Amino acid sequence: MDQSNDDRSLGRLFGDLSRQLTTLVRQEIDLARTEMSAKAKAAGRDVAMIGAGAALLYAALLALLVTVGLVLIELGLAAWLAALIVAVAVGAIGGVLVMRGRDALARQSLAPERTISTVKDDAEWAKEQLS
């Protein structure tokens, strides 16, 4: 605020403060929207990784069960033993993919931290203006 213009009326001062607060609130909303969009995009990539890992896990499980089952049967093992071996191996790989995606998603904070910080600063500024 311009300190040299002390002869403004109380009504005009409150009007100026109201306009400044309105502008400030709009800017904070824009900042929150931008920050949340960036965080949602990052979370979307992590969710996509979980989905891709799960889809690959399923496809690999089916293909490997059939392939290893046929090979192990050809080598003289029982079909159930071949299926069990493949299921354990593919389950471990899929589990690792899902855990990596889940862990990356858990590390993402979806709170608009910059906006929260600036809103606190703005509240302090508004208190100072009213004092």
Image: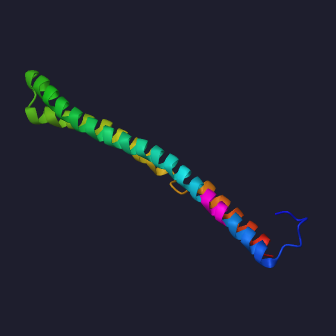
- The spot of residue 107 in percent (x, y) is 50, 49
Give the magenta part as a residue range: 22-28
Q: Is residue 108 left or right of residue 5?
A: left
Q: Is residue 118 above or below residue 79?
A: below
The residue at 17%/37% (across/down) is 84
Q: Quadrant of the N terminus?
A: bottom right
The residue at 82%/76% (across/down) is 9
Q: Nearer the viewer, residue 95 or 130?
A: 130
Q: Is residue 11 above or below residue 102?
A: below
Q: Is residue 101 left or right of residue 118?
A: left
Q: Nearer the viewer, residue 100 or 40?
A: 40
- The spot of residue 70 in percent (x, y) is 10, 25
Residue 87 sits in quarter: top left
Residue 83 sits in quarter: top left
Q: Nearer the viewer, residue 25 or 9?
A: 9
- The spot of residue 93 in percent (x, y) is 32, 36
- The spot of residue 94 in percent (x, y) is 30, 38
| Magenta span dominant secondary structure | helix
Q: Is residue 38 left or right of residue 24?
A: left
Q: Quadrant of the C terminus?
A: bottom right
